[in-house]
Image (cartoon, grey):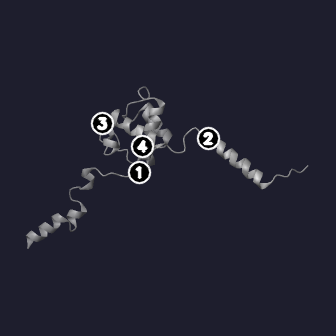
Amino acid sequence: MRISISSSKVVTVVWSAVSFLMLCAPTQMAASSKARRRGAELFAQRGCAHCHGPAGVGGGRGPDLQLVRKRLTKQQMWRQIHDGGMMMPAFGGVLTPPQIHDLIAYLRAKRKVILSPAQAHPVGSQSEIAGGPAANQEHAEAR
């Protein structure tokens, strides 16, 4: 027995299956801007900046979080925030799962590397060594 199926029916079935799987996926494809905004507010209000620096820039006690999306997956971020570890306290008893998701959305949305003042103008930087203002001043005084 041979069954004949048109290619348009196959495409329709495949597209329906893909759409269904996308809707049922356990994680969202992209975090909403509202989630990122709530995550930024949580970051500022819950004391994250105390260890990780303002907006996650600079670090100090904890690591700089500017490019954390390149170092940790969403699942790893969840585990770190929820369970703590590596000197970070656990926040699973303090934050709700939706709040943790919002923090992760905020951290994963960070794209631009912001230099701290020390990184932007380090002592002995190339501009000072090779023709920058300090080198030009020294050269002028030597004449």
Label 2 Cα neighbours within 10 Å, binned few <14 / some 14-19 / many ≥20: few
**In the rendered view, would you say 88 is above or below 132?**
above
Nearer mark to the viewer, of 4 and 2: 2
Label 4 sits on residue: 107
First in sequence, mark 2 or 3: give its number.
2
First in sequence, mark 4 or 2: give its number.
2
Amino acid carrying label 1: it is Arg
Label 1 sits on residue: 111
Amino acid carrying label 3: it is His
**In the rendered view, would you say 57 is above or below 90?**
below
Label 2 sits on residue: 23
Q: CA distance from mark 2 to mark 1?
A: 27 Å
Q: Mark 1: which secondary structure?
A: loop
The C terminus is located in which quarter? bottom left
Q: Residue at x 37, y 47 (%)?
A: 66
Question: Measured from the top left, where is residue 67 in percent x and y?
Answer: 40, 48
Label 3 sits on residue: 50
Q: Are marks 4 and 1 in contact (CB under 8 Å)?
A: no
Amino acid carrying label 2: it is Leu
First in sequence, mark 3 or 4: give its number.
3
Q: Which mark is residue 76?
A: none
Q: CA distance from mark 4 to mark 2?
A: 24 Å
Nearer mark to the viewer, of 2 and 3: 2
